């Protein structure tokens, strides 16, 4: 656990978990002075894993807090699930691997993970895993050493432990 920029700047790998409100999390990172340090370390290639809201923080912003900027590592905006869907999206859902990933099973395979979210990331070039809840959305993103998962691997049994193990193997610790 870190609470100061120097600790972030010296970390060999970073995990940003998140549960709650996009705006509150980003303001907390700003209040602690961690935003610039996180962006610098991510841009330097240090392995980074954003979990749930931590993944959403990688994007430019979110409809949940339109006046608060995200980290801006990935393009696009986090959007709320459609009005016809029950939110939050909670429970076990299948994630299909869409392209080669260092975290997920082989391309074309799928595994189940535990989700708890009302907002979701758009699909894009960095999307390696897709979940469908009313429409496909990015459940896993990967660009260089930056990774994000919309679900909670720590609550996802053996599949989640495998994913976390793959991330740990990437870290030079």
Image (cartoon, grey):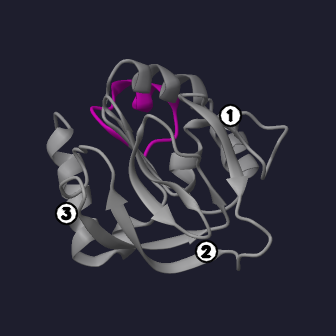
Q: What residue is disc 2 on?
A: 89
Query: Picture quarter containing residue 118?
Result: bottom right
* Mark 1 crowd level (few <14, some 14–19, many ≥20, 10 Å Cα): few
Magenta stretch holds residue 115: no
Who is closer to the viewer here, 60 or 51?
Answer: 60
Given contact means CB atoms under 8 Å apart, are the residues at marks 3 and 1 in contact?
A: no
Residue at figure coordinates x 60%, y 37% from the top left:
59
Image check: 162 left or right of 119?
left
Q: Which residue is mark 1?
A: 30
Q: Position of residue 91 (x, y in %)?
A: 50, 81
The stretch in magenta equals 1-14
Q: Earlier in the sequence, mark 2 or mark 3?
A: 2
Mark 3 surroundings within 10 Å by alpha-carbon count, few (fewer than 14), some (14 through 19), many (20 or more): some
Q: Position of residue 46 (x, y in %)?
A: 31, 28
Classify residue 32 by image quadrant.
Answer: top right
In percent of width and height, residue 139 lies at 46, 56
Quadrant containing the C terminus in the rendered view: top left
Residue 122, label in figure? none
Expressed as whole percent of the image width and height from the top left, the position of residue 108 reads 25, 58
Q: CA distance from mark 3 to mark 1?
A: 32 Å
Camera-side residue of 52 and 113: 113
Residue at the (26%, 57%) spot, across then down = 164
Q: Earlier in the sequence, mark 2 or mark 1?
A: 1
Count of numbered tags: 3
Q: Which residue is mark 3?
A: 162
Could you say which quadrant of the image residue 125 lies in?
top left
């Amino acid at each position: 656990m870190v609470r100061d920029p120097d600790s972030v700047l010296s970390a060999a790998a970073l995990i940003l978990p998140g549960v709650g409100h996009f705006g509150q999390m980003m303001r907390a990172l700003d209040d602690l002075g961690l935003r610039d340090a996180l962006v610098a370390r991510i841009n330097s290639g240090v392995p980074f894993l954003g979990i749930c809201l931590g993944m959403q923080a990688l994007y430019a912003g979110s409809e949940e807090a339109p006046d608060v900027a995200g980290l801006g590592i990935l393009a696009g905006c986090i959007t709320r699930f459609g009005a016809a869907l029950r939110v939050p999206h909670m429970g076990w859902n299948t994630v299909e691997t869409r392209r080669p990933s260092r975290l997920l099973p082989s391309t074309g395979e799928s595994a189940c993970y535990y989700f708890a979210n009302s907002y979701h990331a758009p699909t894009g070039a960095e999307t390696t895993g897709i979940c469908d809840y009313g429409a496909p959305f990015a459940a896993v993103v990967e660009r260089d050493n930056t990774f994000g998962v919309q679900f909670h691997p720590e609550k996802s049994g053996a599949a989640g432990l495998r994913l976390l193990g793959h991330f740990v193997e990437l870290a030079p610790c």
